[in-house]
Amino acid sequence: MQGVTVPRDDLEAKASSSGRNQSGSPATNQVPRLTSVADTGAKSHSRPLATVGVWSFRALLVLPFVFMAPEVISLVLGRPNSVANVSASTADVLGTSSLLIFAMMLTVTPLHTITGWRWHLILRRDYGVAMFFTAGADLTLAALTTGDTFTGGPLGRIAGHTFLVFGTLSVFLLIPLVLTANRRAMGWLGGHWKSVQRLTYVLWVTILIHLAFLFGLSSIFLEALAVSAPLALMRVPSVRRWWRSARKARAHRLIRCGAAVVLIGLFSVGYSQLVGELAIKGSAAFVQRPPSD
Amino acid sequence: MPIDPVEYAETKRRRLRAWRLTMLMTAICLLVAFGLGVFQLQAEGLNQFLFRAPGVGASK
């Protein structure tokens, strides 16, 4: 799995053009990856649609900031209750958004495995970078405004509880991931780039621990588990290999279809709950009436 | 095109150095986060650190 990544095509193209493979060893008998005529035709035919799709998904990334904008503007202008409002909203809006964006980022690879689509691969990097900014904004606002609920100053507000430590740790883990999510870093790290991006797995675990400490075995933690389970299953190498070869051979259609329905169903159950949560808390934040604790 | 072994070795060394630098940065991030946690644990006590009242940290 890759998390905050540049599409693999770029990596392969770069490795091929520099005469080396991904592990940095000299290219021996390396055959450049060729695109078939059929692929090219399909690509050129669906390119406008793919562009619309990619930009539609990118547009969703501004939503958390739109939800929080009125409260943050009030905070900057020093209006009454603005600190309390931001304090009440930041975790609900930006925290839930970060989780949703992370889940979307993790969905890119399984979606490619299931369908063979490539148009959406660029979104993996976009969603990873967006998650960094959303989670970073959450951490910053929490450090600045949650003095009413946490003692110990700004440090207490980002590390005063077990769940805060793991939330902060998750944001910090995003730093190396985001800094290396570009072509220059890929060239710089060569074959090691992939191992750096595997930090996404660690991040995944720390996010789940953060949610477990925060919510226990209820609500958002269970929804996060429901979202995570199909994404994790589709990353099991044997499952991924089987699915890919079956898809290419056009075999086991019934099994694949049934499994896809179950996996997408489970994912949707968790994801729709999280979206509902964000819609309620986000709209309340937008009108500056966050739920009182 | 033949590959220059000197250039290849240099590239390999440069990439390893870059990877070490990235891992060092990651380790620092981990240490800072856990360091802050340990500092707060000492300052606030175990109960305060482990348990949260409803509404603290999230509205649920």
Image (cartoon, rainbow, N blue to C red):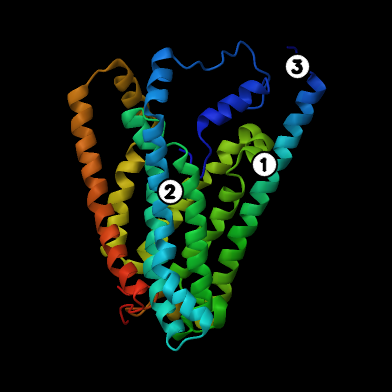
Q: Chain of mark 3?
A: B
Kindly identify which numbered label has been placed on residue A186. Answer: none
CA gap, disc 1 and disc 3: 23 Å
Label 1 lies in what chain?
A: B
Q: CA distance from mark 2 to mark 1?
A: 30 Å
Q: Residue A132, percent across and down?
A: 51, 56
Q: For numbered disc 1, what is the local secondary structure?
A: helix
Coordinates of residue A109 in the picture (x, y in percent): 40, 36
> Label 3's element?
loop
Q: Position of residue A240 (x, y in %)?
A: 36, 29
Outermost residue toward the bottom? A80
Viewer-side label of 2, 1: 2
Res. A82 image quadrant: bottom left
| Front in this rendered view, residue A50 or A201 | A50
Q: Residues within 10 Å of mark 1 (few under 14, many from 20)?
A: many
Q: Which residue is the site of mark 2?
A: A58
As helix, strand or loop, the secondary structure at mark 2 comes to helix
Q: How many marks?
A: 3
Residue to which mark 3 is pinned: B3
Q: Are marks 1 and 3 on the same chain?
A: yes
Q: The disc numbered 2 marks a residue on which chain?
A: A
10 Å neighbourhood of mark 2: few (<14), some, or many (≥20)?
A: some
The image shows residue A121 at horizontal and vertical percentages of 44, 36
Name the kind of residue labelled 1 in the image. Answer: Trp
Name the outermost residue toward the right.
Answer: B6
Residue at left offset 73%, top offset 12%: B1
What amino acid is found at the position of numbered circle 3 in the picture?
Ile
Q: Which residue: 41% across, 33% down?
A: A119
Is A111 situated above or below A79?
above
Q: Which residue is mark 1?
A: B19
Residue A217 seen: no
